[in-house]
Structures are given as C-alpha cells and as structure tokens.
Amino acid sequence: MTKPIDPSATTAKNRRVFLKTSAIAAGAAMTGSPALGRAVHAAGSDVLKVGLVGCGPRGSGAAVNALSADRNARLAAMADLFAENIHASRRNIKKLKSDQVAVDDDHCFTGFDSCRRVIESDVDVVILALPTFFHPMYLKACVDAGKHVFCEKTHAVDAPGVRTVLAAGEVARQKNLSIVSGLAWRYDTGVRETMKRVLDGAIGEIVAVEHTCNTGSLRRRARRSGWTEMRYQLQDWFNFFWLSCDLPGLQLVHSLDRAAWAMREEPPVKCWGMGGRQTRVGPQFGDVWDHHATVFEYARGARVYAYCRQQDGCATDVSDCFHGTKGRCDLLRCRIEGENSWRYEGPDCNRFDLEHVALFSAIRGGTPINNSLYMARSSMLAVMSTWASYTGQEIAWEQAMRSEHVAAPAALSFEAEPPTKPDAHGEYPLPIPGLTKFV
C-alpha cells in the first residue's frame, strides 16, 4: 500500500541541515578573492582553466561544448561523487578534445567535498552538472570563491534552493562574474529570432500557451550489491524527487522556461495540476511519477498549459504553441501564422555550444552575463508544477516562494539516510493528492 509523504516531519530538521551544508560549501569556497578575483579575466587574456563538477553524460557533454566554444579553454580539474564517472568522462572528452584536456590524476576529485577541491585548484570557470539538489549550494560556493559558472538545469528542487540561486546571482553581479544557465533554448538562434518577434507583438497579446513534452523513459540504474541506500539513490537520481524534482524538473522545465520568456518573466498568480504513475510502478522507479499536467494562471487572464509524460510505447511530442490575439507561434519550428506570418530560414545551430560561446565571450570581453533571475524563476515553476500534482491543491507563486520545505538528507555521506527510504517490501512512500501537503 502506498504511504503518503508527510513533509512536516522533515521540514524543520532538513531546513537546518540544508543551511548547514550550504554554509560548509560556502565557507570552503572562501579561498577566492572577496572582490574581483583572478577568475575575472580581462579582455584578451589567454588560457581559461575549466573545472567540471559532475562527470555524467550531460556534464561530459557540457565540457566538450565549453572546449568547442573557446579554443583557449583547458579542462584542468574534474569532480564527481564516483571515481568511475571521472575516468570514463576524461577518456571520452580526450577522444574529442585531446589538446584541450589537461587533467592529471591529482586533479580528479571524488566525494562530497570534490566541488570544494575543484574550486581550490585555481580554475577560472566551473561547470556544474550534478543531481539538481546540489546545484544551489555549489553555485553559491563557486560565486563566493570568485568563479564564473555554467550551471546545468534544473537549478533547484525547492524554494530555499531557488532563493539561494537568486542570492548567488546578486553576489555574482557585485563581483562582475558570469553565470550562464543550461536552459539552452534561450541561446538557440532560430528560437531567439522567433521569440523576439513574439515579444515585439507579431502574434498580438498572448492569451494561452500549450507546452507538450511527451517522451519515453529516461535511463535508470539498477541497485548493486553492497551499495548503501544513499549511494543507490545518488546513482539513480532521476528517479528520486529530492534529487531531481520529478519530471517537471527533469524535462518540463525547458518548456516552462520558454513560457516564462514569452510572458516577459512575469510570474504566474497560481497553478494547479494532476499526475500520477501508471507504467513506471514498483520500487525500481523510486518515488517519481510518469506524467504531470499543470495549468498556470496569470494576472491578466492568460493561461499556460504544460504537459509531460515519460511512458514507453506511447505517442511522443515535444512542442510549444503560443496563441495570441493576432496569430499563433509554433516556437520550436520557428514559425508564426496569422496577421504577421513568418518562418525562420537561417542556418541551424548548436544551442549547447552557443551557451558556452556566450559565457566565454562575456568573460574575455569583460562584459558579465548573468542568467540567475530566469534560472531561479523557471526552476520555481518546475517546483510548483510538481507540488500541484502531488497535493491536488492550487499553489500560489507567493506561497511557493515563501516555502521553507527543504528536500535534504540529515547528512551528506554514503552512510547517511536519504530523505526517503523504502519499506519492508522495498516500496517508497508516494505523495497522495488530497493528503500530501505543501509547506
């Protein structure tokens, strides 16, 4: 039988643990200059040393994107919770960028303090591509140490994490540091040109937005003999809410970010939604769901309808449709229909390279770029979407931003107990709409 989550049982304790671990990460980062550290390169400087924290497929890909974006960038340090990830990542990146990889064994760091050790290794830029839970505290640590940062999506799994991202963004502004988000569609050439026309009024006032992100299942890691429960959850982090923020954090956040962009970064008044688990059932799928549907309501009457599903064997669709008073926009196809019909006919691009081109150009040109506001707000939309499904209640923006609920373990070690644990039958507690509360 499925057991309801009781957030109130963990909120206060985990809040203290979250603040403590954040403080530890930040304190460790204070090896950097309190003002404009050496990581703030003047225009025309030569080599920029890059540290990679999180050596899974996305982190490895981001490192290749960074090295492709700047021929004088050098991968100088690598960190991950697991040594096997570092070895595989270094080997694979070397195959593509052998002349830009300068990571010896002494600069490969493992464990929960590995981000601190990368920061202390004198890198200029840090790529963060970890389970989402870690992003806020490590972003803060990097900025406090005077490092430029590329941070993969999603950027937080709860409101305190969102507020940490916002605070780190403000520190980065004061220090003239750059923060670039992995919400990569903001750097896609065709999408940028299409969105510019939408914001300039090509479809009139937006009255409704439809986002669909229906795909098959993501990868999962089977439990191995000898692993602690914490190690298992960290290896299979896609399938645990406290690490991933469920499907809205894993995939729908890109769609929600594009909605926020089109709505001129105006937050919604509230949202409501529904979801569940139909095909991905059993302990091997942790505590996340396989479908969510959320409606966001805005003060001027517009609505955003956002759907995501990960079920194998079903129809797939990833699309955005913006409906306005003068027409409609199919954003991902870069097409506008109506009074001002238009379609993008420019060249294709690699948005994953372009976000790093923007970062390194900003560093070398001495013109910092800071994505922290939208990366925090779009992450908050993902948090709201998840909890609207979990609770079956309306979630107001102001309520969500004030939330003190923290998804955090009592300690960060492989022997510590994670926030969710299986029962005697191996089943994890699941939220039950109508019973689960958002606090």
Image (cartoon, grey):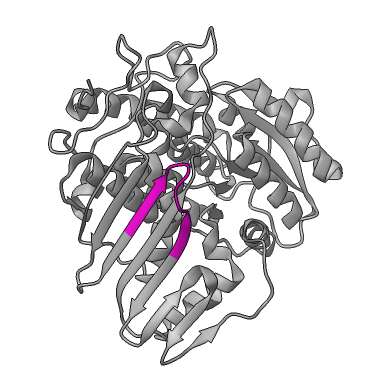
26 and 196: which one is in front? 196
Instruction: Answer with the quarter of the image where residue 77 lies.
Output: top right
Image quadrant where residue 84 sits: top right
Q: Residue 352 is drawn in which quadrant?
A: bottom right
Residue 8 in magenta stretch: no
Residue reaching furthest to the front: 313
Q: Who is closer to the viewer here, 114 or 198?
A: 198
Residue 169 in sight here = no
Residue 309 colored magenta? yes
Q: Position of residue 308 (x, y in %)?
A: 38, 51
Q: Nearer the viewer, residue 157 or 425?
A: 425
Lateral position of residue 324 relative to residue 148, left or right: left
Residue 164 point in image, percent of width and height: 38, 43
Residue 203 vs 250, above or below: the answer is: below
**Looking at the picture, does residue 226 appear above or below residue 218?**
above
The residue that appears at 45% across and 53% down in the rendered structure is: 315
Q: Answer whether residue 231 is visible to the viewer in this image.
A: yes
Quarter containing the N terminus:
top left
- Residue 383 drawn above or below residue 71: above
Give the residue at the far left of this rendering: 434
Nearer to us in this view, 301 or 338: 338
What is the span of residues highlighted in magenta in the rendered image?
Answer: 306-319
Q: Image check: 128 left or right of 310?
A: right
